[in-house]
Amino acid sequence: MKNIRNSGKSFNFCKFNVITKMIMAMMMVIMACDVNNTAMADNSASAFVNNVIYSHRIAVFSKSYCGYSLRAKRIFKDLDEQPFVVELDLRDDGYEIQNVLLELVGRRTVPQVFVNGKHIGGSDDLKSAVTSGQLQKYLSSS
C-alpha cells in the first residue's frame, strides 16, 4: 500500500483505487439497467404496435391535431367503418411507437393506416386506395 505525505496529510492510493473501481462498477450497473429499460420499452412498444395491427380490422396510428390524420379518420367515417385509432400525441409512449412504425414501414409520419394487417400507408395512400377500389378489396378480405 502506497502512502504519500504532503504537508503532513497522507493519501492512500490503494483505498483510492478501490473506491474508483466501486464507482465505475456502479456506473456500469446503472448504464446496463438503463439500456435494459430502453430495450424493454422498445419491445413493449413493438408488441403493442403488432397487437394493434393484427387484432383490429382497421388500425390507424394518428395524432389528434394532425390534419392528415383527421382526413384519414373522416374517410373511414364516410365509409361507415370504425377504425381502431391510436392517438400518439395522447400517449406517453407515442415517440417509441413512432420509432417502431419507422422500423416496420419506413415512416414515422402520421397517419399510418393498416387494414387486415396490411399497411395501406398515409392519408394520401388511403385516399388513392379508396379511389382505385383497392381499399374495398382489402376490407372485404377479412
Image: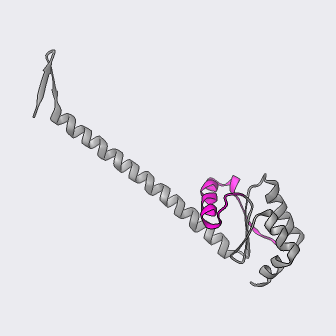
The residue most toward the top is 7
Q: Quadrant of the N terminus?
A: top left
The residue most toward the bottom is 141
Which of the 4 image quadrants contains residue 67?
A: bottom right
Asked whether 45 or 123 is in front, the reply is 123
Asked whether 90 or 32 is in front, the reply is 32
Asked if residue 107 lies in the magenta stretch, the reply is: yes
Which of the 4 image quadrants contains residue 70?
A: bottom right
Asked if residue 33 lies in the magenta stretch, the reply is: no
Q: Residue at x 35, y 45 (%)?
A: 27
Q: Residue at x 57, y 65 (%)?
A: 46
Residue 57 placed where, x, y %?
Answer: 73, 76
Asked whether, in this view, residue 2 is left or right of residue 48, the answer is left
Asked whether 72 or 121 is in front, the reply is 121
Residue 65 placed where, x, y %?
Answer: 78, 51
Image height of 142 relative to 78, above or below? below
Asked whether, in this view, residue 22 is left or right of residue 10, the answer is right
Q: Residue at x 47, y 55 (%)?
A: 37
Q: Which region is colored magenta?
A: 80-109
Q: Is residue 16 visible?
A: yes
Q: Is residue 80 visible?
A: no
Q: Residue at x 21, y 37 (%)?
A: 17
Which of the 4 image quadrants contains residue 95?
A: bottom right
Image height of 138 relative to 39, above or below? below
Residue 115 placed where, x, y %?
Answer: 74, 75
